[in-house]
Image: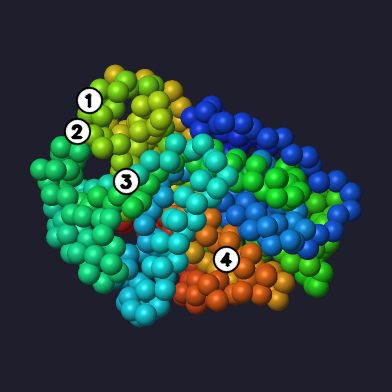
């Protein structure tokens, strides 16, 4: 299986973090060696984002000899660039999951999702990761017609799933919490949270290092020879491994076509204003929660530790990032907060995430000694971290929780890997038009 470069090299300088607010405020930046020569290990993990870091850490804690490879840097991909929202539940709502897999299995998926949130918080506490963890996500309805569903869904989570951390927010309250007239209601989930995503990833990397994981950066896998053991070929070396973990998400491309046919890369963009000061910041988001709105092309935003507004949004259907990301994302930001029209934007960056057709992650045993978890569809802070733990468990002979996720239907994109992009663009255009109506 040979890899083509694709999104892995489309928009960024090789081996360099993006010029993001997260990079500028990273607690520390590690420098790990390039893999050279012949290596052997129990498990080779490809991709040093949340899933790969978590997998490597939990395997090392179980006594496995682990090599962790990244084509660029630890936390370089979506794990170090995202909106930082640690959300409740799976990517699909529980009522949708009940229709998809039935109530009993939907309950299992709910328990796993709650476990994912707890795992992130526990890892932060255990390894003393300083990543600005704060409680609360406000889900904001941009259409009046969505409000009744939000109220019913909060009641459903309380009644069916015994979740008492979420409550309905009416129009008057949401306008007290957010200094905008863009929303008609929503829900406030205080069991959810938000954090500095790159610092969380770097903290996991330090925990991996302390647990004995050998980490290699700027070490792109070029080809894999299946077998027991598997052999991974790189530009300057080779790894022989009893097991292989694929944790590549939107960057897998042709390294494993079965994954690439189900997990499609899309780009997303975030800007950061200059520091706004305590008074203005608390006017914009009174309770310091993160916000995610109901648009299909979602707006998501929150305040940083130094009171900047970090705002993600905008539609992009190109393989390449926009030339001026700051201007690109400033437009939807001003639709929500027109009072920020004179506030300078200090950072603007893009990233690539992996989505699936039904937005549920793709877990798969690709071979007896090869596992994949990817396609977290914007819900990866929690679920990718849990995915790493589940893959470690499966390799260690305890696959029950991995199997729960693997049984969720995840289909091949229409058109396969080569034609999925234009078909997705048509779908995105339709839903973005629906957002405006």
Q: Residue at (81%, 46%) from the top-left corner?
A: 35
Inter-mark Cα distance, 2 to 3: 17 Å
Q: Are marks 1 and 2 in contact (CB under 8 Å)?
A: yes
Pointer 1 or 2: first along the chain: 2
Inter-mark Cα distance, 1 to 4: 45 Å
Q: Where is residue 383 in the image (x, y as percent from the top left)?
A: 48, 58
Inter-mark Cα distance, 3 to 4: 26 Å
Pointer 1 or 4: first along the chain: 1
Observer-side mark, 2 or 3, equals 3
Query: With respect to residue 345, does 121 lie above or below?
Result: below
Pointer 2 or 3: first along the chain: 3
Query: Does dot 2 land on a helix, a strand or a loop?
Result: loop
Asked if residue 406 lies left or right of residue 357, the reply is right
Q: Residue 179 carries which label?
A: 2
Q: Where is residue 274 in the image (x, y as percent from the top left)?
A: 39, 22
Query: With respect to residue 410, does 241 lie above or below?
Result: above
Pointer 3 or 4: first along the chain: 3
Q: Residue at (59%, 41%) from the top-left corner?
A: 203
Where residue 371 sits, quadrant-wise, is bottom right
């Amino acid at each position: 299986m040979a890899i083509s470069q694709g999104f892995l090299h489309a928009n960024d300088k090789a081996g360099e973090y993006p010029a993001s607010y997260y990079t500028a405020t990273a607690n520390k930046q590690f420098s790990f060696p390039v893999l050279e020569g012949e290596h052997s290990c129990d498990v080779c993990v490809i991709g040093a984002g949340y899933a790969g870091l978590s997998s490597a850490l939990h395997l090392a804690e179980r006594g496995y000899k682990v090599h962790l490879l990244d084509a660029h840097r630890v936390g370089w991909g979506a794990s170090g660039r995202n909106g930082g929202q640690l959300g409740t539940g799976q990517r699909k709502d529980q009522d949708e999951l009940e229709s998809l897999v039935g109530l009993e299995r939907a309950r299992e998926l709910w328990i796993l999702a709650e476990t994912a949130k707890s795992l992130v918080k526990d890892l932060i506490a255990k390894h003393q990761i300083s990543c600005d963890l704060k409680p609360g996500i406000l889900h904001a309805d941009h259409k009046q017609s969505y409000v009744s569903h939000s109220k019913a869904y909060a009641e459903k989570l309380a009644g069916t799933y015994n979740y008492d951390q979420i409550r309905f927010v009416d129009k008057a309250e949401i306008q007290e919490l957010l200094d905008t007239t863009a929303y008609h209601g929503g829900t406030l989930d205080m069991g959810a949270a938000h954090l500095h995503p790159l610092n969380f990833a770097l903290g996991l990397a330090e925990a991996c290092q302390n647990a004995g994981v050998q980490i290699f950066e700027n070490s792109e896998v070029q080809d894999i020879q299946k077998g027991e053991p598997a052999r991974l070929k790189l530009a300057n070396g080779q790894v022989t491994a009893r097991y292989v973990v694929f944790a590549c998400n939107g960057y897998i491309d042709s390294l494993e076509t079965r994954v690439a046919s189900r997990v499609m890369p899309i780009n997303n963009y975030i800007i950061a204003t200059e520091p706004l000061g305590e008074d203005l910041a608390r006017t914009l988001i009174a309770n310091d929660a993160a916000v995610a709105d109901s648009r299909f092309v979602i707006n998501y935003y929150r305040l940083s530790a130094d009171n900047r507004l970090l705002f993600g949004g905008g539609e992009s259907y190109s393989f390449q990032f926009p030339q001026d990301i700051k201007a690109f994302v400033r437009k939807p930001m001003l639709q929500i907060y027109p009072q920020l029209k004179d506030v300078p934007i200090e950072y603007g960056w893009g990233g690539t995430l992996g989505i699936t057709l039904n937005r549920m992650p793709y877990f798969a045993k690709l071979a007896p000694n090869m596992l994949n978890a990817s396609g977290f569809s914007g819900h990866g802070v929690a679920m990718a971290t849990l995915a790493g733990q589940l893959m470690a468990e499966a390799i260690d002979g305890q696959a029950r929780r991995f199997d729960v996720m693997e049984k969720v239907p995840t289909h091949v994109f229409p058109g396969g890997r080569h034609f999925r992009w234009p078909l997705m663009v048509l779908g995105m255009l339709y839903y973005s038009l629906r957002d405006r109506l």
